[in-house]
Image: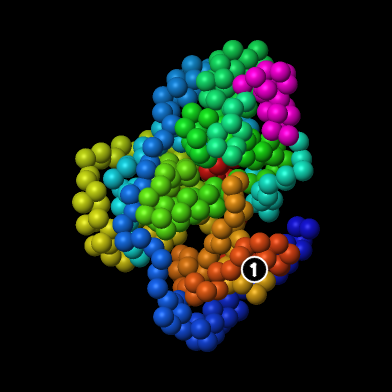
Amino acid sequence: MENEFLSKVEDNAVVRAWSEKLQSEKGDSLAEGYVSELQDFTRINVAQNELQELRDVWASWDEGTKKLFYQNYGDISYLLDVRVDKHLFQVMVQCPRVQVRKTYARVFNGQTFAKKLMSISGMSKPWVTARTQQKGDSKCIPWDNLRDLVLTHPDERKRVDIFALSIYGLVIFPKALRYVDEAVIDLFDRLEKGITPVPTILAETFRSLSTCRKTGEGRFIGCAQLLMVWFYGHFWKVDKISYRVFFESYSPLKEEAAIQRREDITEEKWVEILQNLKEGDIEWRAYWMVPDEIMYRCGNFDWVPLLGIWGATGYTLLLALRQYKSRQFVPRPTDLLNVNSLSKAPTIRRKFGSYRMPGSKLVG
């Protein structure tokens, strides 16, 4: 299955020739007569869970417990200290213009929500059943109940697992405030099987931003902290020591959490800053990313499907080719068809060289 999914690798020259031919045949990114359905203005709600209780739990742990957490879940605890600039976030939406080969796909015929939560928490079925609540169309577990387990569970490993689950549910996938959604528990239950949550995080980020942008309003339910790290990694020019990415101790999250950023920049000022960006202001490739291959198209489609925990979205990686010093190609909107039709389509990868991936523990 894995070999079939990653069935073909193409080098830079082949991809460049293909993309230029496609650009010549299809013209620009917009079909003639295309009218955008996007709203002229988007008011996005960036209400988030209050993270102080999570920080307090982390601060109460000794170094041995923290080490156990790092060994199993990497550096995601640093997300608790990444500040979200609400003014910048609003402007970003307004702008008009692990085992990496194992990705997550939700299994609907697997264990039930209760069984998975029982396995993660070590608690009985009656305990889980009594605390399960319905929020909209999903089952959830309140953070208050998980917090009590983190503070009192006699098994240190279970305390670590439940705390990590809470970060995934409250920070990375914060659908319902102060609740952990069943879909998050499904993904978390499979982390130990070697899946990477990165494409899922990316998918839900796109889905949420796109929904808000299309309707003109809504609450962002992706990981705002990771989006801030991405923004500053690409748009804030500072001196970087590139060789650090090859050290096991290097962490983009740790570095961002330690930086003191200004909190008095208004929304209007951010608009001015972004509107006046120049080529030299943008770091097209994140300084800590040394890629080997990327997926850039799937079957006959010029894009790749990303599966989230609440749905799927199309990711046009050709938009990012400039990051790898190659020509950027923008497919027509009419080419972005239903992602469900790609379930059996082979994915084609583009090879960039024989670099070693750094030991960065960004998430998971």
Q: Position of residue 331 (x, y in %)?
A: 51, 74
Q: Main secondary structure of the magenta part?
A: helix
- Asked whether residue 330 is in view, the answer is yes
- Residue 184 x %, y %: 60, 38
Percent position of residue 250, x then y: 50, 41
Left or right of residue 139, residue 275 in this image = left
Residue range (magenta): 112-131
Classify 10 Å Cα crowding around label 1: few (below 14), some (14-19), many (20 and above): many
- Direction from residue 10 to residue 7 in the image, left or right: right
Residue at the (55%, 73%) spot, across then down: 335
Q: Give the labeled residue for mark 1.
A: 298
Position of 263 compared to 172: left or right?
left
* Closer to the camera in the image, 136 or 211: 136
> Label 1 is placed on what type of residue?
Cys
Label 1, secondary structure: give it: strand
Q: Position of residue 195 (x, y in %)?
A: 67, 45
